[in-house]
Amino acid sequence: MALETTLILFKPDAVAKNLVGTVLSRYEQAGFKVRGLKMMKLSDEILAEHYSHIADKPFFPDVRGFMQETPVIALALEGDDVISKVRDLLGPTDSKAAAAGTIRGDFGDKEGDAKMRNVCHASDSPEAAEAELKRFFGEGEIF
Ligand code: ADP
């Protein structure tokens, strides 16, 4: 077991559908601790960096547009093995393939844009978490 911190983004679908508190309570009920929380608008630059692994995909402009529909809420969440455990709580990228009981299965968009409107981003490895926490939180913003 490793004590880790992961970076979560509540995406614009979660913000627009008033799901932030419901989803955050799932993370807290799983025993994880809030270490940083902020609302922010995402620029083209930060999205190009954050989504560099999909920048050449045909759907990237739609993802960028979606991520700019509303400000997002960035969360630094700490706990034992939190990085993989939060990915399990979320379920797979495509909400349609996500089981009931997972966050994406319960709250993700099941039609049309299902792969895009999937409630939260969460870091997928310790290396990604380190880079992403630095990308979204400044010095002194994680406690
Ligand atoms: P995850 O967020 O589950 O780690 P990826 O890093 O592969 O998934 O993709 C980043 C984001 O891009 C996804 O969360 C989703 O919003 C969007 N996305 C991924 N694949 C598709 C797709 N085929 N069509 C539309 N949007 C997609």
Image (cartoon, rainbow, N blue to C red):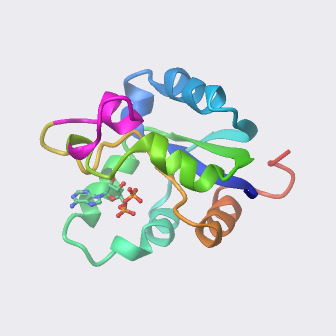
Q: Is residue 113 above or below residue 24?
A: below
Looking at the picture, does residue 98 appear above or below residue 100?
Answer: below
Relative to 34, 111 lies left or right: left
Closest to the observer, 108 or 140: 108
- Whole-percent x, y for residue 90 in the image: 43, 42
Give the quadrant of residue 134. Answer: bottom right
Q: Is residue 38 left or right of residue 99?
A: right
Residue drawn at point x = 55 percent, y = 22 percent: 21
Name the quarter where the N terminus is drawn: bottom right
Q: Position of residue 29 (x, y in %)?
A: 63, 25
Which residue is at the far bottom? 56
Residue projecting furthest to the front: 1
For residue 97, above or below residue 83: above
Q: Position of residue 7 (x, y in %)?
A: 62, 53
Q: In the image, ligand 1 is in what quadrant?
A: bottom left
Q: What residue range appears in magenta?
A: 97-110
Given residues 87 and 53, the one toward you in this image is 87
